[in-house]
């Protein structure tokens, strides 16, 4: 296959040299007269050159548009994946919180807060409210237990601060502040006893 390509190239080179020789060494005098055949050939060659240039420009602009469309679609898919991942992680935190509901109430509380953070990331406000309701219930149902022996839950304040710094915090601010006020009230009661 390589030999065929070389022979074809060599044959094309030889034919090109012969054509140059015939056109360059002709014996009749060169005239620069303008007749209708030369003019029409010149106009047609100019038009063909312009059309080829136009096609090249179209191809380049088409490639840019395709790249932009593809990058937009990739960004949409990445956002969907990120939202679904955040939703799944929020669901895991919610389920874990429910699992710790009676055995480790403050750990359940913290899981619900983490779930709120992930649900805020994917703008799932229905599940944010479910987490908030569970936070209220875990405090109400375990209030006496928490007053008698309030366990220290590491990083609880940092987790709450993370939610307060979230860009969409304002949507749940009032509900979370009410629940947090109840938790702090329980904490103060436990200190007195």
Image: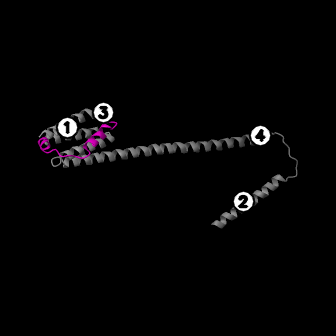
The N terminus: image quadrant: bottom right
Q: Which circle's residue, 4 or 3, is located before the other in the chain?
A: 4
Closer to the observer: label 4 or label 3? 3
- Which of the two labelled residues, at mark 3 and mark 1, occupies the earlier sequence position? 3
- Which of marks 1 and 2 precedes in the sequence? 2
For the rendered model, the colour scheme is one colour
Which quarter of the figure is the C terminus placed in? top left
Query: Could you say whether the residue bearing mark 1 is in a helix, strand or loop?
Result: helix
The residue labelled by disc 1 is 184
Q: What numbered label is drawn on residue 170? A: 3
At label 3, counting other C-alpha atoms closer than 10 Å, the crowd grade (few under 14, some 14-19, many 20 or more) is few
Disc 3 or 2, which lies upstream in sequence?
2
* First in sequence: mark 4 vs mark 2: 2
Q: CA distance from mark 3 to mark 1?
A: 21 Å
Q: Is residue 165 magenta?
A: yes
**Image-based side of 190 in relation to 23, left or right:** left
Residue 21 to residue 175: above or below: below
Res. 62 mark: none
Q: Start and end of the magenta stretch?
A: 143-168
Q: Position of residue 56 (x, y in %)?
A: 62, 44
Closer to us: mark 2 or mark 1? 1
Give residue 26's position: percent from left, percent from top: 85, 52
Q: Is residue 54 magenta?
A: no
Q: Quadrant of residue 137?
A: top left
Q: Secondary structure at mark 2?
A: helix
Question: Disc number at residue 12?
Answer: 2
Of marks 3 and 2, the one in the foreground:
3
Determine the secondary structure under disc 4: helix
Left or right of residue 78: residue 23: right
Q: Which residue is mark 4?
A: 39
Residue 10 occupies quadrant: bottom right
């Amino acid at each position: 296959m390589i030999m065929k390509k070389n022979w074809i190239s060599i044959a094309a080179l030889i034919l090109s040299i012969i054509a140059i020789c015939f056109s360059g060494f002709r014996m009749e005098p060169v005239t620069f007269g303008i007749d209708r055949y030369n003019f029409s050939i010149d106009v047609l060659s100019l038009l063909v050159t312009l059309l080829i240039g136009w096609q090249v420009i179209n191809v380049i602009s088409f490639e840019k548009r395709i790249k932009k469309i593809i990058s937009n679609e990739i960004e949409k898919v990445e956002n969907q994946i990120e939202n679904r991942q955040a939703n799944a992680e929020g669901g895991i935190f919610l389920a874990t919180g429910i699992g710790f509901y009676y055995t480790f109430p403050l750990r359940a509380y913290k899981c619900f807060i983490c779930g709120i953070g992930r649900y805020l990331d994917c703008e799932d406000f229905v599940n944010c409210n479910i987490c908030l309701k569970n936070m209220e219930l875990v405090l109400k149902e375990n209030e006496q237990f928490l007053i008698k022996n309030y366990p220290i839950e590491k990083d609880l304040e940092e987790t709450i601060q993370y939610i307060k710094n979230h860009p969409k915090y304002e949507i749940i601010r009032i509900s979370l502040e009410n629940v947090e006020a109840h938790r702090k009230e329980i904490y103060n009661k436990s200190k007195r006893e």
